[in-house]
Image (tube, rainbow, N blue to C red):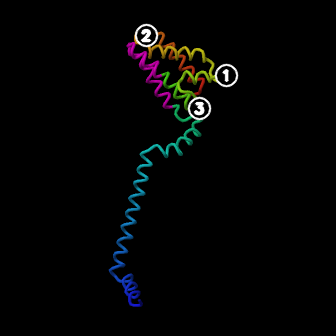
Amino acid sequence: MANLGEKIISFIFSPNFVGWFLLAKIAFIIFGIVLFAAVLFFLLRTKFLNYLFVYDIFEFLTFRPFGVRKIEKDWNKVMTRLDTGLESEYKLAVIEADNMMDETLKRMGYSGDALGERLKKLTAATLTNIAELEEAHKTRNNIIHDPDYRLALDQARKTLSIYEKSFRDLDAF
């Protein structure tokens, strides 16, 4: 037995084993650096760090909820649809405005499966033009469910102005 123990100890302290051990340490250090770099790369590519830090800092420094710029940008796209002169674009603008309102109310925590259910949970204190917004939502439903529904430019402008007032009342932009 003593002979076996001496062989193991001499193998561990032999120059061959120390050399292999050094190579293994270097390989694990390189592997660790590559894994760390991969984790950083994927964290920066995803929005996780933004959700974790940047959004809160942005809201604090600008005194506006995060996402307002996106809503404003999307709203400008909706409004440019009215400049095309096409009825289909007017209809699409109303549908997009309705979807934006639905997403805004979802983010604000109003429950319900559809915008109609969320609107029923709002009060006049929360939204001053709730009745007009319900009518605008009915216009959107008519567009969706009736393929022969006609939407004039004036009616589209009026409907979009209702949505715009609602967004402003909700401080969405």
- The magenta segment: 69-96
On the image, which quarter does residue 148 sit in?
top left
Furthest residue to the bottom? 2
Q: Main secondary structure of the magenta part?
A: helix
- SS class, disc 2: loop
- SS class, disc 3: loop
Which amino acid type is shown beneath numbered disc 2?
A: Tyr
Locate residue 94, reporting x and y percent: 47, 18
N-term mark: 3 or 2: 3
Task: Determine whether, in the image, residue 168 is placed left or right of residue 82.
Answer: right
Looking at the figure, which quarter contains the N terminus?
Answer: bottom left
- SS class, disc 1: loop
Task: Determine whether, in the image, residue 54 is placed left or right of residue 15.
Answer: right
Q: Which mark is residue 125?
A: 1
Task: Determine whether, in the image, residue 101 is placed left or right of residue 93.
Answer: right
What residue would you read off at disc 3? 109
Which amino acid type is shown beneath numbered disc 3?
A: Gly
